[in-house]
Amino acid sequence: MSQSAKKARMQVAGALSKQIASRRGWAKPVSADATLLSDKALQRAGFPDPSLIFRWQEIAGPETARVAQPVRCRKGPEGTVLTLKCEPSASVFLQHETRSLLDRLNAFLGHGAISRIRIVPGALRPARDVASHPFPKPAPGQKRETGAQLENALDRLEKLRKSTPKGA
């Protein structure tokens, strides 16, 4: 057998082992896929850096973030234009804050990253409140077990385990 045929066979075997290893179905963190998908969606909307959306409240400040949200970022002949959707009553406030907001955005993204801000009035989606506890609230009329009830249940479980034979 020639040296090149052996080398080619080894390359094919290596490629197959990589393919098999990638199909094993190991669990991956959901955050990796979610971040990848959100990055792609934000890049389609023209955002150069996805953290602009994720950290909007830190960049813009709480007052501005409460009344305006970034919608799109487009490059044009005069530079990059950031489109903000704002509450109709807040458009005058945003017009006055445009220069300081541009300074903060360019400090975050880099000098000259955003050249102009376009303000579009519209209704904002309210921010959803995230539950502080992972367990759902009990339905009306449903009782949650108190500490005494749980303690009694654990005592009953202990008695049951002691009474059953080990082989059963």
Image (cartoon, grey):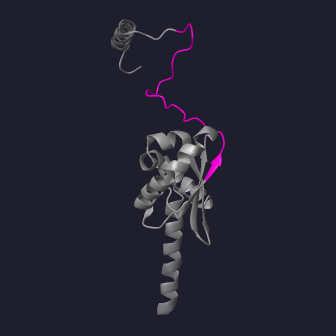
Q: Residue at x 61, y 38 (%)?
A: 89
**Residue 31 or 99: which is nearer the viewer?**
99
Q: Is residue 90 above or below residue 20?
A: above
Camera sees residue 27: no
For the residue pair 140 and 74, the one nearer the viewer reads as 74
**For the magenta stretch, what is the residue range?**
119-142
Where 131 falls versus 118 (above or below)? Answer: above
Magenta run includes residue 72: no
At which x and y percent is residue 161? 36, 14
Magenta span main SS: loop
Q: Is residue 34 left or right of residue 59?
A: right
Query: Residue 24 at x, y = what percent?
Result: 51, 56
Q: Quadrant of the C terminus?
A: top left
> Which residue is rendered at x = 48% and y = 74% of the image?
14
Q: Is residue 17 left or right of residue 77?
A: left
Q: Position of residue 117 (x, y in %)?
A: 56, 57
**Residue 140 included in the magenta stretch of the image:** yes
Is 168 above or below relative to 123?
Answer: above
